[in-house]
Image (spheres, rainbow, N blue to C red):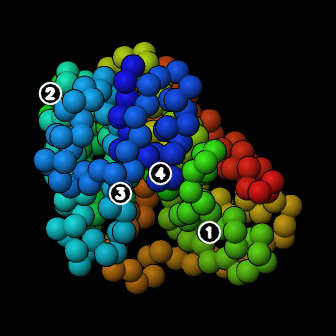
Amino acid sequence: MRIAVLGARGQLGAGIVHELSTAHDVRPFTRSELDVTDDGAVAAALGPLKPDVVINCTAYNDVDRSEDQPIDALNANAFAVRALARAASASGGVLVHYSTDFVFDGTASEPYSEDDPPNPRSVYGASKLLGEWFASDAPRAYVLRVESLFGRAPGGPAPKGSVARIVESIRAGRDVRVFEDRIVSPTFIIDAARATRTLVERQAAPGIYHCVNSGRCTWLELAREASKELGIDARLVPVRASETKMRAPRPQFCALSNDKLRAAGVTMPPWQDALARYVSSVSVT
């Protein structure tokens, strides 16, 4: 298959390119090479290419800044997806788009399923939800909701995000402030890339899937597990998200169920297993 990957040098994009390049004709596009918020540029780049699959790894991920720059968030997270869906439609191809747990309000007590109604509480979450709707304009679309992405693909950028910060701080012997009341289901990019490949290659039913590692944890529990894997007595400082002022509200309970993905033939490893692999990979660098 000919596969166009947008945002190919980002954390997730690099993982997608690495995973799919072993078996497919992957055409990577970096942000500097293709501005996905420019409809004309998207059509000009993807029209002649006629990709079988368009994978969108671009996003405006600054949750707090989105509150002050909603147009930027909407352009990148929503209207760009509409342009990519049109490009996929023009070539008769498949669109893969990644969304987020922030489409939910975080008031649940059990992991969210794909059938639970979204209710975003932030501009970022609303822009990502709109992007999900635009993705459905493609003839076949997979919307994969990921959460708290972590990891590094070979040749990819340096790890970033909450998990990377926690692991780096533990290794450096610094105090590590972690939420004890925010519950997540993190996503290891290596596992997300493999899940994406499986869905596309098996031509699974299109739709929304929660692409997260199995299980759930607080950030404090994750930090303790990382400390154990590193063999370091970490200086963990529990804090409460409910008492922390942030520009944009965060969903406090944002664990996602990946049962639908499992039913499609993709079993995501437990988050503890994913974290162990990540810690092992950064410990040798």
In the visual, does 67 lie left or right of 159? left
- Residue nearest the observer in this picture, 101 or 200: 200
In three-dimensional space, the C-alpha distance between marks 1 and 3, rounded to whole angstroms, equals 27 Å
**Disc with the residue nearer the chain's start (1 vs 2):** 2
In three-dimensional space, the C-alpha distance between marks 1 and 2, rounded to whole angstroms, equals 41 Å
Classify mark 2: helix, strand or loop.
helix
Q: Mark 2 points at which residue?
A: 90
| Mark 1 or 3: the one toward you | 3
- Residue nearest the observer in this picture, 218 or 189: 189
State whether residue 270 is above or below residue 104. above
On the image, the x and y values in percent for residue 266 come to 51, 25
Res. 139 image quadrant:
top left
| Mark 1 or 2: the one toward you | 2
Whether the residues at callouts 3 and 2 have beta carbons within 8 Å, the answer is no
- Residue nearest the observer in this picture, 86 or 48: 48
On the image, the x and y values in percent for residue 121 come to 26, 65
